[in-house]
């Protein structure tokens, strides 16, 4: 992106539509690290998750770049049982295959230690808001920041708390869709700085900071 372009376009390639919750985090990190242009983020919609999960990461990247041209590519994979280094190497191999070794497009790997839901388990007000019961009194008992990266199943932990603080019962609770409500959490958080205490988040910010500097996106 040249300096006279007034918009930074990025594309997020991920494992499913639920990963769109990462976009407010990416927007915040770009702003925090000096991007002043308008930010236009797109989640690469590559079809139904059941289909998208069956195609290789290389094909996903190739299709995403064809359908969503951009200045910056984010590729998300949960680390799960692999190390962050293994996931990054896997993403880099896919990029080389998809684009060739002389590819110029900046790429940032987004690799939470477990699942990206762990990055939303720190803001009590946002969780209460997403549950539709902002003034509720039921305790959330959120894990401490240092515990977040060791939670075996942060998605279940987050969904359970959303249902708990909704204070709904019976049929109304059965109709409560935690997987939809979770998107409200990330879009209502203004400050993700507490996550800088997490190794995977800190690594993501370092990569974004480096690329922003290399591309000159932090200069007026």
Image (tube, rainbow, N blue to C red):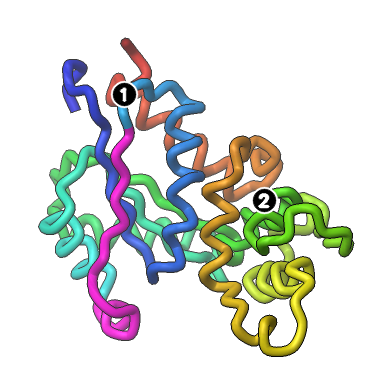
Element carrying mark 1: loop
Front residue of 138 and 10:
138
* Residue shown at the point (39%, 71%) measured from the top left: 16
Element carrying mark 2: helix
- Badge 1: few (under 14), some or many (20 or more) residues near its Cα, within 10 Å? some
| In the image, residue 44 lies in the stretch drawn in magenta | yes
Q: What stretch is highlighted in magenta?
A: 39-55
Asked if residue 32 shows in the view, the reply is yes
Image position, residue 17 (x, y; %): 39, 68
* Residue highlighted by disc 2: 126
Q: In this view, does 95 lie to the left or right of 121?
A: left
Counting residues from the start of the chain, the first of labels 1 and 2 encountered is 1
Front residue of 210 and 155:
155
Q: In which quarter of the image is the N terminus?
A: top left
Q: Is residue 84 left or right of residue 38?
A: right
- Badge 2: few (under 14), some or many (20 or more) residues near its Cα, within 10 Å? many
Residue 82: which quarter of the image?
Answer: bottom right
Asked if residue 141 shows in the view, the reply is no
* Residue highlighted by disc 1: 37
| In the image, residue 191 lies in the stretch drawn in magenta | no
């Amino acid at each position: 992106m040249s300096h006279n372009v007034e918009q930074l376009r990025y594309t997020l390639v991920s494992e499913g539509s639920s990963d769109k919750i990462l976009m407010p985090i990416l927007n915040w990190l770009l702003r925090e690290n000096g991007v002043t242009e308008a930010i236009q983020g797109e989640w690469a919609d590559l079809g139904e998750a059941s289909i998208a999960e069956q195609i290789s990461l290389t094909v996903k990247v190739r299709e995403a770049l064809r359908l969503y041209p951009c200045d910056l590519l984010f590729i998300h994979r949960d680390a799960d049982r692999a190390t962050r280094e293994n996931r990054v190497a896997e993403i880099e191999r896919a990029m080389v295959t998809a684009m060739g070794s002389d590819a110029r497009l900046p790429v940032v790997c987004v690799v939470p230690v477990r699942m990206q839901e762990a990055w939303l388990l720190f803001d009590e007000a946002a969780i209460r808001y997403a549950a539709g019961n902002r003034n509720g009194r039921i305790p959330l008992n959120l894990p401490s920041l240092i515990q977040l990266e060791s939670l075996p199943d942060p998605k279940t932990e987050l969904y359970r708390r959303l249902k708990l603080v909704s204070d709904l019962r019976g049929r109304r609770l059965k109709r409560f869709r935690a997987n939809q409500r979770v998107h409200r959490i990330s879009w209502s958080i203004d400050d993700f700085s507490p996550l800088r205490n997490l190794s995977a988040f800190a690594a993501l910010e370092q990569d974004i900071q480096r690329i922003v500097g290399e591309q000159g996106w932090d200069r007026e």
